[in-house]
Amino acid sequence: MEQRISLITLGVGDVARSRAFYEALGWKTGADTGTEIAFFQVGQMVFSLWGRELLAGESGVEDSGGWGGVTLAYNVRSPEEVDAVLADAEAAGGTIAKSPEEMFWGGYAGAFLDPDGHPWQVAHNPSWPLGEDGAVALV
Amino acid sequence: MEQRISLITLGVGDVARSRAFYEALGWKTGADTGTEIAFFQVGQMVFSLWGRELLAGESGVEDSGGWGGVTLAYNVRSPEEVDAVLADAEAAGGTIAKSPEEMFWGGYAGAFLDPDGHPWQVAHNPSWPLGEDGAVALV
């Protein structure tokens, strides 16, 4: 297995609502309005939004109905940008799950939930400077 | 918010066990053995394994204990490679959640669960040819 991920799919209750949330944050999808799946190009990978029940079926799992041990993170270039992204997420209809604070690992971070409760940590990690394209490279 | 993801973190019960599973599939981490977190470079992003309880706390969520609506996918270049990756995952200690079959969307896919039950779809999607580096590019 090559060291790569092709897609991350979030199961959602309403693709149109979820899509509108990510579009409000500035993301762009080529999907037609009203389609039952929305794909977003993220680097070498695709982020997709699809009905949660369908995703559970295709994954061969039972749905617990809540959070299941997966968190995404979006790293930024300054503590101020953490605050700004969290404010944008809240304005777009997200929920602040963790107000930003200094972290034990030396950075500054908070978290928001998307309309389906999927968490995103928004972090400034001074040990992991971002590339010009936003890439994170482990040393 | 730029259209990118910095990290995907899977909450796990035992980082050493989970790390050994992904290493058995061929992935490499620079983390010291015995550390409480393991990072893997995947393209412009980082995939990490961390204690599920700690991850729930840092994400500001309650843990449902099961699957929570997120599935990763690993796309490959042929149907035969789907079968091979699923066999490798099972040999490494994963569980086959969906035996591979022809999919309604025109490809061939199955799914395995990692040792903590996190699902990975393994798919050949003829509509999405992979780049030399394995990248998926939406048209």
Image (spheres, coloured by chain):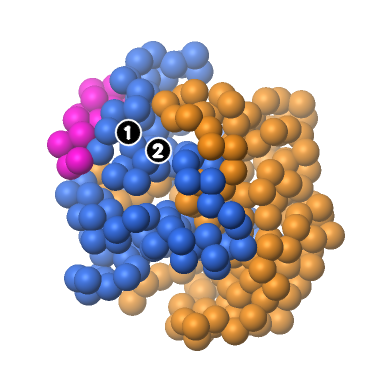
Chain colours: A blue, B orange
Task: Name the amino acid, label 2.
Answer: Pro
Residue wearing tag 2: A119
Same chain for the residues under marks 1 and 2 in the image? yes
- Answer with the quarter of the image where residue A57 lies: bottom right
Give the secondary structure at mark 1.
Answer: strand
Q: Earlier in the sequence, mark 1 or mark 2?
A: 1
Tell me the CA gap for discs 1 and 2.
6 Å
Give the secondary structure at mark 2.
Answer: strand
Residue wearing tag 1: A112
Task: Name the amino acid, label 1.
Answer: Phe
Expressed as whole percent of the image width and height from the top left, the position of residue A139 reads 56, 35
Which chain's residue wears label 1? A
- Residue A51's place in the image compared with A134, above or below, is below
Q: Can the viewer see residue A94?
A: yes
Q: Is residue A57 magenta?
A: no
**Residue at the image position 67 percent from the left and 25 percent from the top:** B36
Question: What secondary structure is the magenta-colored segment mainly?
Answer: helix
